[in-house]
Amino acid sequence: MHEFPAYRAPSQHEVTDLVRANPFALIVSGGSADEAPVATHTPVIIERLAADDGLVGGEMLGHIARKNPQWRSLHDGQPVLLVFSGPHGYVSPTAYADDPNVPTWDYAAVHLTARVTVLDDPSESMHVVTRTVHELEALESTAWDPTGSLPTFERIVGGVVSFRFAVTDQRAVFKLSQDKPADVRERVVAAARARGCPHGDVGALIERIGAGS
């Protein structure tokens, strides 16, 4: 992903927070002159941050269905791309109050390059799925206690293959109308909320990050 200088992430905290708050990622692998890359949508969570609390140097966890053939093409140490999409939304020129103008799209996204380790042991997969549940339940207003369901987890965990991802590179874009004056950003936010923010509360990001530009 190309990082536009005007739309770089305002801080590592914002990048990490986007990844943690939007864990439904794409695992992208493969690709050659004759074949397109393969991608799977699945939760990918932070297992460990780096010593500087960044993602590069840290580790992520994920899993996919065993019936999904993508895992068979992965080998330990192979680079993969992990794609995390944050809130986003269309911006109509009606928010600019001047002509001529053109529409655009405000969005936040993080791409992580990582080296994969395939975890095909049921005990390792149990760790991955239970950690995933723990992380996702932490995003809920009232967390579910999975203790009583662990025997069910153990019975069906063979149906997934799990992965550890060692993060080696990070790219992030936070394009949130930073190049527009405050009154325009306010109208973009109002339009997004009037539309209902179908792709996440991009208005909140514009208010928080666009105002800090």
Image (cartoon, rainbow, N blue to C red):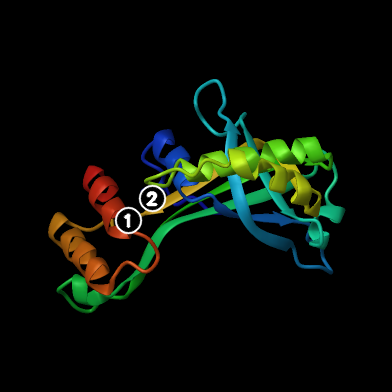
Helix or strand or loop: what does disc 2 sit on? Answer: helix
Instruction: Name the residue tied to disc 2.
Output: 7
- Please report the residue visible at 72 percent of the width from the left and 39 percent of the height from the top: 126
Is 133 located above or below residue 40 in the figure? above
Q: Nearer the viewer, residue 31 or 42?
A: 42
**Residue 50 position in % (x across, y down):** 57, 25
Image quarter for residue 151? top right
Q: Which mark, by number, is residue 30?
A: none
Q: Nearer the viewer, residue 65 or 206?
A: 65
**Residue 90 position in % (x across, y down):** 35, 71
Instruction: Name the residue tied to disc 1.
Output: 176
Residue farthest top in this picture:
51
- Between circles 1 and 2, the one closer to the viewer is 1
- Please report the residue visible at 43 percent of the width from the left and 45 percent of the height from the top: 139
- Kind of residue at disc 2: Tyr
- Kind of residue at disc 1: Leu
Q: Earlier in the sequence, mark 1 or mark 2?
A: 2
Helix or strand or loop: what does disc 1 sit on? Answer: loop
Task: Mark yes or no: residue 104 visible.
Answer: yes
Q: Is residue 100 left or right of residue 19?
A: left
**Residue 59 position in % (x across, y down):** 64, 33
Q: Is residue 13 left or right of residue 83?
A: left
Q: Are marks 1 and 2 in contact (CB under 8 Å)?
A: yes
- Please report the residue visible at 81 percent of the width from the left and 68 percent of the height from the top: 35
From mark 1 to mark 2, how far is it between C-alphas? Answer: 8 Å
Image quarter for residue 154? top right
